[in-house]
Image (cartoon, rainbow, N blue to C red):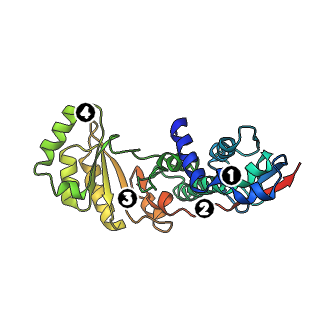
Amino acid sequence: MKMNKLDALIKIALEEDDAFNDVTSKNFVSENKKAKAVLIANRDGVLAGVDVFVKVFKTLDGSCEAAIKKKDGERLQKGDEILEITGPARTILSGERTALNFLQYMSGIATLTDRFVKAVAGGKAKIYDTRKILSGYRELAKYAVKCGGGTNHRMGLSDMVLIKDNHLKLIKDLAFAVSECREKYKNIKVEAECENLSEVKNALAVKADVIMLDNTTFETASNMISVIRKSSTQDYKPEIEISGGVNAQTVKEFAKLDIDRISIGMITHSAPALDVTLEMSID
C-alpha cells in the first residue's frame, strides 16, 4: 500500500479509537515512563502486517523503536516472539489495540490462505483472492494473501474485464461488445463467468483469456473443462478458473481437475484473526 494511503488508514483507525486522547493512560501512567512490549504468537499461523503494526506506534510517537524477530510470510509457532517495541509507556498502551487489530486481521488472512495453498500443493492450480474485502482494507488484505502464498486477482474494476452473469443480462451481442472493448483497450485481459455449457461456448467463441466456472459441482465443472480443453488450440488456450462456494473440503477435489486458478472469497472476507498478544514490561 502506498505510504500516503496507509498513513491515512492508520490515522483514521487511531482517531476512531481516540488513541490521541487515551484518558486511562494519560491519567494513570507517568508521561516519562518508558516501556518495552513483546509481541507473542498464541497460535500457529503465518505472519503479515509487521510494518503496519510498527507504523501505528510511530504515528503516535516517532521515538518508538522496534526490534523485528519475524518477518511477513514467515510461519509462526505458538509462543514465538515476533517483535519488541520500545518507547513511552503511554504510547504503547494507547496504540496496542489498533496495532493488534491490523496485524491479527492480516495474519489471519495469510494463515487461511496458506491452508488452501497447502491443500492444492503438487498440482498446477493456484489460489486466488477476490474483491470480497472490507472497503479501505483491500491493499492490506491482498498483500496478506501474497504473504500466505496466494495470488492476487484484479485489484479493482479497471484492471481487467470480468463479464459476470448480471452483465450478460444487459449485453445483446457479446462478440461485438468484447471486440469493441479489445479495440479500445489493446492489452486488457477478458474473463468470462460461466454457469453452464452454453455460456462456456459463448466464452470460447469470443476467445476469453480466462473462463471462470462459477458455482458448479465437480461433475459439471469436469464436463465444461473437457469442452474447453478440446476447443483449445496452440494459439488459443484459455486459463480455467473455479470460483464460488469453494471450501477446505472441496478445494482438494477441484484441484485435481485440469484448471489453472481457484478463487476463494472466504480467505479475505471470513478469515479468523490470528491470536497474538502484546506483553508489557517496564524498562
Query: Marks 4 and 1: CB-CB under 8 Å?
Result: no
- Please count the marks in the image: 4
In space, the residues marked 4 and 2 are separated at their CA atoms by 40 Å
Tell me which numbered mark, 4 or 3, is placed earlier along the sequence.
Answer: 4
Locate residue 223, reporting x and y percent. 29, 61
Tell me which numbered mark, 1 or 3, is placed earlier along the sequence.
Answer: 1
Query: Mark 3 — residue?
Result: 243
Three-letter code for the amino acid on which mark 2 is drawn: Ala
Q: Which disc is residue 95 wearing?
A: 1
Query: Mark 4 — residue?
Result: 185
Element at label 4: loop
In space, the residues marked 1 and 2 are separated at their CA atoms by 18 Å
Element at label 2: loop
Tell me which numbered mark, 1 or 2, is placed earlier along the sequence.
Answer: 1
Locate residue 173, reporting x and y percent. 11, 48
Comparing 121 with 212, the one in front is: 212
Residue drawn at (50%, 58%) of the image: 267
Tell me which numbered mark, 4 or 2, is placed earlier along the sequence.
Answer: 4
In space, the residues marked 3 and 2 are separated at their CA atoms by 24 Å
Task: Point out the residue furthest to the right here.
Answer: 283
Three-letter code for the amino acid on which mark 1 is drawn: Gly
Element at label 1: helix
